[in-house]
Image (tube, rainbow, N blue to C red):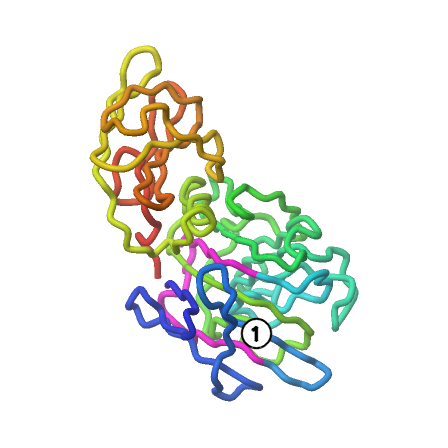
Amino acid sequence: MHLPFDNNLTDTTGRGNNGTGKHNGGNAAAAFVGDGILGSALHYETDTNSLSTNYVSLGVRPDLQFGAGVPFTVSYWIRLPLGYNHGDLPFLCNVVGATFSGGGFTFAPSYGTAGTAGTGTVDGGWGMSVYDLSGAGIGLYGDAHTIDDGNWHHLVHVVDRDPTTAGTLTYLDGKLARSARQNGTTAGAAGDLTTTNATIIGQDPTGAYFENGSAEIDDLGIWRKALTPLEAASLYVAATVSGQSFAGTATLPPLSIQTLPGGKFKLTWPVGTLTSATNVAGPYIPSPALHRRSQIVCLEPNSIARLSKNIEAWFCLHIFQGGQESKGFPGHTFGVSQNAHSNWV
């Protein structure tokens, strides 16, 4: 699923996971703002004083049902009001009662000290939970005051249900975020997450979750797979460096890589400029051979190389120490990555 929120609620994957605007439970036009991270963005809000709720329902979609053992990844840009310290009005949720409730997933702010239904302890952080109906699963909070500065922040939640892996990882603005387990054990412990509840943006499935709050959300994507660290970080780079969504249509030039003795690599490309960085978020340093189309380079271990043509391109080459290169996103060899659309829903 991919909802760019470009003044509509259309799923651009063509799979029909379109949203419906809601006001106090009835259908209504959704509210958009013009200063999203990529064009426009969706605004949602709940005011318990006036008993007013504005949110979006995605309905009960087969694509958003995750049976036992099915991994998934949720990515979105979020902007909370400056100094946000309210409760856990969900970013995305299919569980009645929001964070730490059973029978599905919730992605929300951490519960702050000015919560409506109670007093929390973590202001301005992110929270998430994945529980089956028996209560098995995990609930996490990120660090306080990491997303409450009034700016846009990118979150990628990777829910790997394989009990032999790290389980649940969250990336904040392209980097692996710290998290603290609030209760539960692992995402792998959660069994069937299939539910008859609708998946909701900005509320819980009742449409009446009694927590004040508001936010803007942009470029929401869901995959039925666990994205790799490179894929997760590249989603952030795509937007911040190139102003592109992960579902862009840029055409990749061919790039070949030949491993040479001495930890060197020969890269050959038809157009563009090679740049490199030791962090996926940059800064990127131009290669000395700006106009060549074949070059022998020796990059630092775990560095990133990138080609650009006219604009800062948003596909990366990740090279590990010892001449081993990772693939980028599915479908692109030699570690070149354009977008992460494979296996989205």
Rendering quarter of residue 209: bottom right
Residue 60 forms part of the magenta stretch: yes
**Magenta residue span:** 54-78
Tell me which residue sits at (36%, 23%) in the image.
Answer: 288
Residue ID for mark 1: 44
Specify the farthest residue to the bottom: 26
| Residue 177 % position (x, y) | 59, 44
Rendering quarter of residue 328: top left
| Residue 19 % position (x, y) | 42, 75
Examine the rendering and report whether any part of residue 26 can be seen. Answer: yes
| Residue 156 % position (x, y) | 50, 51
Is 270 left or right of 165, judged from the image as shown?
left
Tell me which residue sits at (27%, 29%) in the image.
Answer: 291
Examine the rendering and report whether any part of residue 314 can be seen. Answer: no
Relative height, residue 163 to residue 245 (above, below): above
Locate the N terminus by quadrant. bottom left
Tell me which residue sits at (65%, 60%) in the image.
Answer: 150
| Residue 272 % position (x, y) | 28, 37
Rendering quarter of residue 252: top left
Tell me which residue sits at (31%, 64%) in the image.
Answer: 13
Q: Nearer the viewer, residue 204 or 68?
A: 204
Locate the C terminus by quadrant. bottom left
Q: Amino acid at mark 1?
A: Tyr
Q: Nearer the viewer, residue 288 or 242?
A: 288
Report the label total. Answer: 1
Would you call the spot at circle 1 few (<14 residues within 10 Å), some (14-19), or many (20 or more)? Answer: many
Residue 76 forms part of the magenta stretch: yes
